Amino acid sequence: MLKSREWAILPTVVALLKIFADVVNLCEKEDSSISEAIPSAKSIMITLEKTDCKGVVELKEALQQNMNRYFYGGDVRQHFISIEKSELHVIATLLDPRLKKRDFFTK
């Protein structure tokens, strides 16, 4: 049984996880493309930064750390490289006409 404090932070947890659910739903579409990987990762990071996480700061920080680790090369394992250093992802994103004039890359 959840305590009243846990019930109070539940909407915040749901809001944080909804960020990921939206991207998962986008990626599961029949017409999804690898070109959406970089914009999706950026979208998650930006939304996480802007989300107010009263009561679940540790969860937000853990999500941000794992996003950095798996998408931006912060993992020591070689098979996780920065998504922006993956030639396939970069070319696909640059060639996608839906994504023209959008700045998804770190400077």
Image: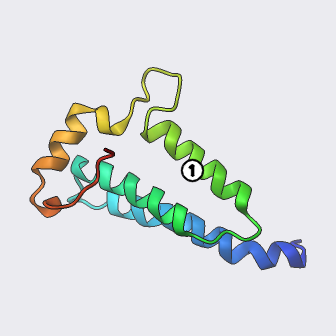
Q: Is residue 28 visible?
A: no
Figure colour scheme = rainbow
Placement of 71 over or under 101, stated as above or below? above
Q: Secondary structure at mark 1?
A: helix
Tell me the residue that label 1 is attached to: 64
Quarter of the image that includes the N terminus: bottom right
Q: Is residue 66 visible?
A: yes
Percent from the top left, x then y, of residue 73? 44, 32
Horizontal side of 67 relative to 23 (left or right) equals right
Horizontal side of 102 relative to 24 (left or right) equals left
Q: Quadrant of residue 23?
A: bottom left
Q: How many marks overall?
A: 1
Viewer-closest of 91 and 2: 91
Please tell me which residue is depicted at 19% across the width and 49% down the height of the picture.
93
Please tell me which residue is depicted at 38% across the width and 34% down the height of the picture.
82
Percent from the top left, x then y, of residue 29? 29, 61
Please tell me which residue is depicted at 53% across the width and 62% down the height of the picture.
48
Percent from the top left, x then y, of residue 11? 67, 77
Placement of 40 over or under 55, stated as above or below? above
Please tell me which residue is depicted at 73% across the width and 55% down the height of the picture.
58
Residue type beneath disc 1: Gln
Percent from the top left, x then y, of residue 53? 67, 68
Q: Residues within 10 Å of mark 1 (few under 14, many from 20)?
A: some
Viewer-closest of 56 and 104: 104
Quarter of the image that includes the C terminus: top left
